[in-house]
Image (tube, helix red, strand yellow):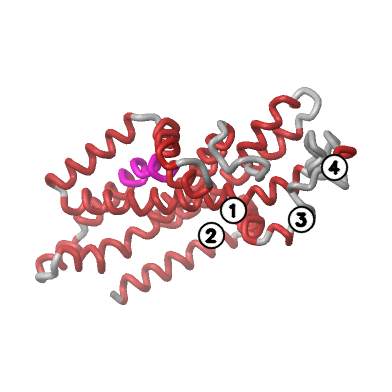
Amino acid sequence: MTGIAVGQLSGARRLWVHIGRPRNAGTILAAVVLALVVIAALAPGLLVSGDPLDVTPRNRLRAPSLSHLFGTDQLGRDVLTRVVHGTGASLSAALVAVTIAVVGGALIGVGAGYLGGWTDRIGMRFVDVLLAVPALLISMTVIAATGGGTVELGVAVGVAGIAGASRVIRSRTMQLRAMPFVEAALVSGWSRPTVVRRHVLPHLWPTTAAVASVEFGQAVLAVAALGFLGFGPPPPAPEWGAMVADGRAFVAGAWWLTAAPALVITVVVLAAYRLSRVIGENHRA
């Protein structure tokens, strides 16, 4: 157990050392972006002071300027304010999706990868069924059954993400199962649940963290896509995907209505992918 704890501590230390290197400015920038996203979701008033629902017809469709950095929409609402306040809905749905995808994927992946046999066959057939159906179609089906809303949106996206997470975690679990220290624990007479809890799960955290980072980026995209299709929170509540959809009718003369939220989605997804790459490199080190 001491060796595992030291290994985890040294791994975390290597991660911070990697982030702190001057040449890794992209990693630092990604961390800053994600930190701003968290602040916007938890305390949007710290970043903007306006009301996202405040309608001001005299300010309608104003281009980006110092007074309105992202411009205004067709009702005179400040786009930056709506983007910041829309972070809460998008991030909440994405975190629900990541939790469901990672937990569900871990249950299937660890069970299938460690136990093997019929457990592996049943688990992987279920995963194959999920992979055979487009993720967006699965999400839309779940939403149709549960209704619209932020939590329902996250559940729908999370169910679609279980398959990818389970395959990665299963692969790593099979590698750990063949490790000498795991085989030694079994020979020593420890039960399988104890071996999994004390020797397999502690070594799965880097893989799980990387999977969660990738799933977060994919979840943000999926939530925005479903919001674009009208499955997100009902208007006038701000949501990134819905804002992109609302701006389509004005894209010729007011490009910022679509470009601003789309750019935010892109930056957040790239930051999440960058973080997952750092975690993966640290794990291989």
Splitting the image into 4 quarters, where does residue 158 fall? Answer: top left
Disc number at residue 48? Answer: 3
| Residue 24, image quadrant | bottom right
Q: Tell me the residue at 79%/29% (across/down).
A: 254
* Mark 3 to mark 4 CA distance (whole Å): 17 Å
Which mark's residue is nearer the viewer, 2 or 3?
A: 3
First to last magenta residue range: 157-167
Give the label, 4 or 2, closer to the camera: 4
Crowding around mark 2 (Cα neighbors within 10 Å: few <14, some 14 to 19, many 20+) is some
- Give the labeled residue for mark 2: 18
Q: What residue type is labelled 4?
A: Thr
Instruction: Report how far apart the C-alphas of labels 4 and 1 lie in the structure.
Output: 39 Å
N-terminal of the pair, mark 1 or mark 3, is: 1
Residue 175 image label? none
Q: Is residue 164 above or below residue 193?
A: above
Q: Mark 3: few, some, or many residues within 10 Å (few <14, many ≥20)?
A: some
- Real-space Cα distance between discs 2 and 3? 33 Å
- The answer to the question of whether label 2 and label 3 lie on touching residues, with beta carbons closer than 8 A, is no
Residue corresponding to mark 1: 27
